[in-house]
Image: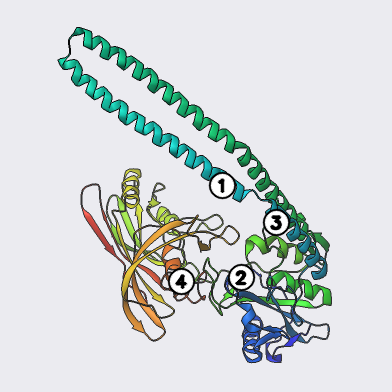
Amino acid sequence: MAVFPIPEALWTPPGPLPSPFDESPRHPAARWAVEDLRRRLREAGQLADGAPVAALVGPRGGTMLGVLVVAAADGSQGYLRAFGGEVAGRSAWPGWAPPLYDPVVYDRLRAEIEAAHAGLRARSMQSELREAEVRRKLACAALDQGLAALAEARRQLRASRAEARARADEATRAALDAESRYAEARWVEARRAHRDATAAADAALAPVRRRAEALRRLERVVARAGVAALQDTLRIPSAAGEARLAELFEGLPPGGAGDCAGPRLFAEALRRGLTPVALAETWWGPPPAGGGRVDGALYPACPGKCGPVLGYMLRGMVVEAPVRAGPAAPAHDLTVLYEDDEYVAVDKPAGLLSVPGRTEQDSVQARLRIATGNGALKAVHRLDQDASGVLLCAKTADAFRWAQAEFAGRRTRKRYEAVLAGPVAGEAGELRLAFRVDPLDRPRQVYDPVHGKLGVTRWRVLQRDGETTRVALEPITGRTHQLRCHSAHPLGLGAPMVGDRLYGTPGPRLMLHAVTLELDTAAGVRLRIEAPLPF
């Protein structure tokens, strides 16, 4: 495959490699290479002979593309290109970095695995199980209907006997009592017969269920074995040698591990004796079903799938620590918006955490504890690190518990303003979308209507200005990244916030600000705290 040239003015002496996990590529040559790759694809209209650019877009969305700036032994520099996974049913196309496995061996093994799956599917008992379950349901429904009819007749006869007893003489009452005892014996017998017949229907269904479940377990075993066998064809190179994919993960590696653009590019550079200078990855096409990807935006390598793989591949290279794309935490003091004996509210600046994180301790809560000498002070709620605006902290445990209950009971009211990178259809409405965390790319959230947590947001357009839209947002629930996801996802407003490094395009700052917060104190006072807009 060719090494595509880059302008000599962008050549830099190979030094420490910028981290592939930078939230926004820093190297100017890498950023230029991304734009050059996209320009070449648009102008050529194809990836290679037989593969149009339209093949980059499939039923699940677009494709992640990558470029790796490399230096040759003579000092010249250019870039390699790669895509992740498959395009138009193939994992390798001329001119693109190949996968880390032999495609011929991989395709033959995959065909064998698919044939085994097809054989299991042919033996599947799902249709037989559904038929057996329908038979049981119909039989039990008839039994239940018969028992219900008998119960109603029993109720009416008991009522009529009760009326007859009221008018009967002693001999007639004795006959009625005997009739009642006989009827109750019949009722007990009918219930026993119903129970036995239901148990027989369940017993008839049980072996069918056991055989169907055994086949399902076998399918899962074959599927796991198939994934493991396919992954075993991947060999991960590094300057220190070569490793099997499974050796780099605890347990079964996640699907797609080792098959992203980044690992393909570094493997190609190692194979050809080229020195990696900088990596950049970009999304091409519409977002995937889960959202979180924007055409043309730059993204870091995902830590879940690529972390262990690239960590091994980069052994022996000097790699800089990753840098986040958002603004740095400001050094200046916090602006206090409100304070009494129970609470203090500040205007949280963009770039500062609300509470200490796993690796970063600087936060609003930590700064206020130092400033007030109050080690019990706690943030009542959270704002995203990249967002700004009203953040409420409690000075006492009682005040914290009260405010937490107000938030949990949705008796507070929060209003945000955001600037979105694109037009928005409509003027106002309510969004109801469920999201969950992507375990392979934390803290990014993905749309998942089945397993996600429902978030509800009311919105209203405030201003339209060319390619941007200013909106007011009122979260009814408090899910992680709720406003950012509801804005960016196509099923939401369809326009990410300006400066959103996770769901849009990184910028100087995330254009999201918590303007007002309203809540009742334990004394019954309604607080309304406001932070002026910084943008």
| Crowd band around label 3 with a 10 angstrom C-alpha radius: few (<14), some (14–19), many (20+) | some
> Which residue is located at x 48 percent, y 42 percent?
138
Is disc 4 placed on a helix, strand or loop? helix
Pointers 1 and 4 in contact (C-beta within 8 Å): no
Q: Is residue 280 left or right of residue 494?
A: right
Residue 410 spot, x, y in % from top left: 31, 53
Q: Earlier in the sequence, mark 4 or mark 2?
A: 2
Give the residue at mark 1: 131
> Please, what is the three-letter code of the amino acid marked with disc 3?
Pro
- Is residue 276 visible in the rendered image? The answer is yes
Q: Which numbered mark, 1 or 3, is in the foreground of this view? A: 1
Q: Earlier in the sequence, mark 3 or mark 2?
A: 3
Q: Work out how far the residue at label 2 is from the one at label 1, CA to CA, in angstroms.
A: 50 Å
Res 69 → quadrant: bottom right
> Please, what is the three-letter code of the amino acid marked with disc 1?
Glu
> Please, what is the three-letter code of the amino acid marked with disc 2?
Pro
Give the residue at mark 2: 300
Q: Earlier in the sequence, mark 1 or mark 3?
A: 1
Q: Looking at the rendered structure, which numbered label has been put on residue 488?
A: 4
> Which residue is located at x 42 percent, y 35 percent?
144
